[in-house]
Amino acid sequence: MLVAAGLRLWAPWDDVFGPERVNFLETDAWYHVRLAESQVRNFPHRVTVDPYAAPNGQYVAVAPLLDTVIAATAFVTRGRNAPEHYIEQIAALVPAIAGVLAVVAVWALATIAFDRRAGLIAALLAAVLPGHFLDRTLVGFVDHHALEVLLSFATLASIAYGTVAGAGVCLGLYLLAWASGSYFVFILAVWIVLAAMLAPAQGAAIGRFTAIMAAIALAIVLVFQDPNLFRYNTQVAALTGLLLVSLAVMFFANHLVKVIGAVALLSVTLVLVTWMLLPGLFNQVVTDLNRFRSDSARMAVLEARPLFLYTGNWVWSQPWTFFRSGFYVGIIAVLGLAWATRRSRRADHLLILCFTIANYLATLGQNRFGYYLVPATAVVMSWFAVRVLDWGGVPHSGNSDPRIKRLLPFQRELAVIAVVGVLVAPNLAPAAITTTRAGGMPGYWFDAMQWLRVNTPEPFATPDAYYARYEKSNPPAAFSVMNWWDQGYWIIQTARRVPMSNPTQNGAGKAARFLTATNEADALAELTPDRARYVIVDWELPFREGPDQSLAGRFQNLADWAGIPTSRFYSQCFARKTDGDPWEPVWIYREPYYQSMVYRLMVLGGAAAAPGNNTYVAQVLERTDAARRRFCEVVNARRFATSEDAKAAALQGGSGFEAFGLTPWQPAFSVPAITGLRVTAEFRDSAQKENETPMIRIFEVAGSQ
């Protein structure tokens, strides 16, 4: 626990708890704090429809437990008038505390399922293994993931120990912590069927236990969960399905064929009934299952990318980058434990296997599930480590003088070195690096948010609307701020203004269409429906040159969300100086890129541009390499004095000739000044010089009052 707490609290402490503000470690944290702040003022009532979340309000599709834990702690200790800074401090500490308690739950599960040595090894591994679990349990990472891990492993430990009330309560609380918690319920349903097949003699007892557990969890969800919550119906349906499957296993436990037949018939019946009578629920389940498939629309969200495609390209070494040796040794341990379980027929060992294998598969589909996978592999690796230590004859409390067959010299020492050198040592440095993660909101963004809060009018009629107790339907905001969705929660919680888009991706398409529009009138038309009065852009939205001839910036995400082929704006081609020379990558930027609103606002500050000697003309040819992969070649690029001369030359050159720029930041085509927006504020990083382009620009719609 001390090791786990030290990694999660000590290293990132100064980055989170600054002298002037609490700087949380990820985007969603700011919205959880916003919900907790409101709940403290209106305790115990929470926000369900938030007028600050979107121009016309938005339902809060967030499970309530994390925010309620934060709010209840602040309310009990300081009352409804608890200072904002105090609430933020509590919020920042909760994930680290939950992470340490999750390590305790891992220890309990491994101790119950295996032995005391395995429990201690599993706890140590869960405390130090790098990856998503450590990352999401750092102080300041205010999201529900730490609670998910704590409550899921508390549920597993309660099942292994045989405490049905504890298992039911933990499972119910787990579903109050995560709207998509049906994922865990499905794993439990698979486990109970396999357990009945593996150990028929225990089937009746396992079915009875799981049925009671499911009934307790279902009662908690029905009483405490918001029926309007996104996936509420999925939670109820999943628990009902688990209850029915458990009853089927209980009644037909001694007849394997009947168990399989009853479960199969029940499953088919439930699917058909849901499909015919509850099409909305059926479609929701199908949509959730499709989340594990690779989807280009989700590539814009890093945590939703498939594990091997995290960088955007297939990288075999990505598991090592994230998880180091735990990922690979965990697979070996799963295979070994599966073989041992086939012989022992232990239902608790099968439960651990089902949970671990499911999270391996889920992590391959979306890397975010690594926060379950890391502690799960810690448990199976602890079993494997104990087997290795037993092979080496390492003494322990259960056998202080083990007598083994010596196969190798220094066998005991080799066993200890193998466990420490493979399971622990390779992970320590990456874990330490993970804990040094910097805070999520840079100083220049904080300054911009403070400016919005102080220098813009209130979006609602009452100045204290931020803490009001809202109704199911609320008056729309008087105005909104056009922004890219990544920073929407910063605008809500820190600036206390209404963003046009937020990290639920609500409004992302509208923001993308505005930012990629090449006609000012079309762009301004996108602002009208949401009454956008201000526009905020930052330096990361346009393209910029990255390391090793790569391309940095978020412009591709903008084009994807706008539904525009990226080839309209830019292409990666190849060129070589002379025949026989190696191909070199060349990024070409077409005129629409320089005409886009995000380029004109962020790079040019809304001013006109008439560049000289920065426009090129070349023949762009479609080629096919030896592996039949298509690519474009740039042939004989020539520079022109003006973009008008370049376009005329390209037109005269005929088919395949194009005018383009080679620099993503310096203009290559003439563009007019923006007339419908005016710069009202600019913000620079503290290390920048005054003559450098600012990091953020804020514009106001011309003529707005």
Image (cartoon, rainbow, N blue to C red):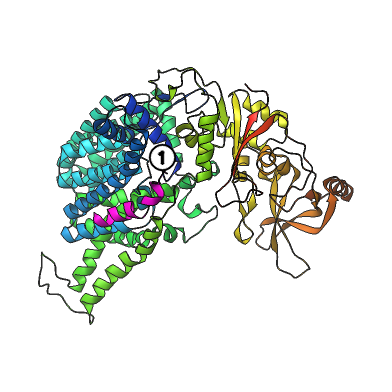
User: Can residue 583 be found in the magenta stretch?
Assistant: no
How many labels sit on residues?
A: 1
For label 1, the residue is 29
Q: Amino acid at mark 1?
A: Ala
524 relative to 160 in the view: left or right: right
Q: Residue 681's spot in the image, x, y percent? A: 61, 36
Question: Which element carries disc 1, helix, strand or loop?
Answer: helix
User: Can residue 11 be found in the magenta stretch?
Assistant: yes
Note whether 393 is above or below 673 in the view shown.
below
- Rendered image quadrant of residue 425: bottom left
The quarter of the image holding the N terminus is bottom left
- Rendered image quadrant of residue 10: bottom left
Foreground: 140 or 648? 140
Q: Residues within 10 Å of mark 1 (few under 14, many from 20)?
A: many
Q: Residue 550's spot in the image, x, y percent? A: 62, 57
187 relative to 696 in the view: left or right: left
Note whether 269 is above or below 583 in the view shown.
above
Note whether 190 is above or below 455 in the view shown.
below
Q: Residue 600's spot in the image, x, y percent? A: 70, 40
Foreground: 168 or 615? 615
The quarter of the image holding the C terminus is top right
342 relative to 604 in the view: left or right: left
Q: Residue 359's spot in the image, x, y percent? A: 35, 49
Foreground: 669 or 675? 675
299 relative to 350 in the view: left or right: right
Which residue extends farthest right?
652
Residue 226 visible in the current orientation: no
- Rendered image quadrant of residue 638: bottom right
Foreground: 657 or 626? 657
Q: Which residues are magenta?
A: 1-23
